[in-house]
Amino acid sequence: MSEEGDETLFFNTKRVREAISLMNGLDETKLAVVVRRLAKAIGDKGGSAAAFTEEEVEQLQSQLGLSAAELTTVLEACSFILEKTAYDLVKPSDLSEQLQTSGMLPPQARAIASVWEAEAKGVLGKLRNASLGGTPRLKATEWQLHVQAARSDLSRVAEPRAIFQLVT
């Protein structure tokens, strides 16, 4: 990031502005709880969609005073913030500053940054070990080499045989 502040982590799109506006209206302690739950779900199967059950989503709607669409916007934005922060390896202090630059109020920005500070190591570890699909990852290889140098009916024979075991 440049020191002049020209570069921002989050593009100032209509959707980002809407999400930040909704997050600014939330209590920072409740926002931190939601973000922490989403952080623990990053890298799992189902991702942020699996972070909350349907019952929990309904409870969140009533607790936060948001409609279903608004809650979806907040959850998706929080997941995006965490994933973008993880992929760019942003420090918590820089994250708070970037969120405030994007229009988030300082208490909410600090709440998200404090969750990131606490959960970053786990999130980065999960993402590092997560497969992006495709072929399985090779965990280990084992091999054996057998060479038959001679036989009773032939004086010189070189028959190498190799056995490879690929562990995924």
Image (cartoon, rainbow, N blue to C red):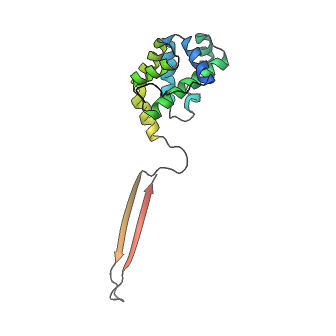
On the image, the x and y values in percent for residue 133 come to 55, 45
Could you tell me which residue is drawn at 39 percent across and 21 percent down? 93
On the image, the x and y values in percent for residue 117 come to 39, 23
Residue 3 as seen in the image, left or right of residue 134: left
Count of numbered badges drawn on the protein: 0
Q: Residue 157 or 116: which is nearer the viewer?
A: 116
Residue 3 as seen in the image, left or right of residue 47: left
* Residue 76 visible in the snapshot: yes
On the image, the x and y values in percent for residue 36 come to 47, 22
Residue 75 in which image quadrant: top right
Could you tell me which residue is drawn at 36 percent across and 80 percent down? 158
Above or below: residue 57 compared with residue 143? above
Image quarter where the N terminus lies is: top left
Residue 128 in which image quadrant: top left
* Residue 53 visible in the snapshot: no
Task: Return the residue found at the far front.
Answer: 4
Residue 74 in which image quadrant: top right
Above or below: residue 161 compared with residue 94? below
Could you tell me which residue is drawn at 66 percent across and 15 percent down? 67
On the image, the x and y values in percent for residue 119 come to 42, 26
Above or below: residue 112 compared with residue 122? above
Q: Residue 140 or 24: which is nearer the viewer?
A: 24
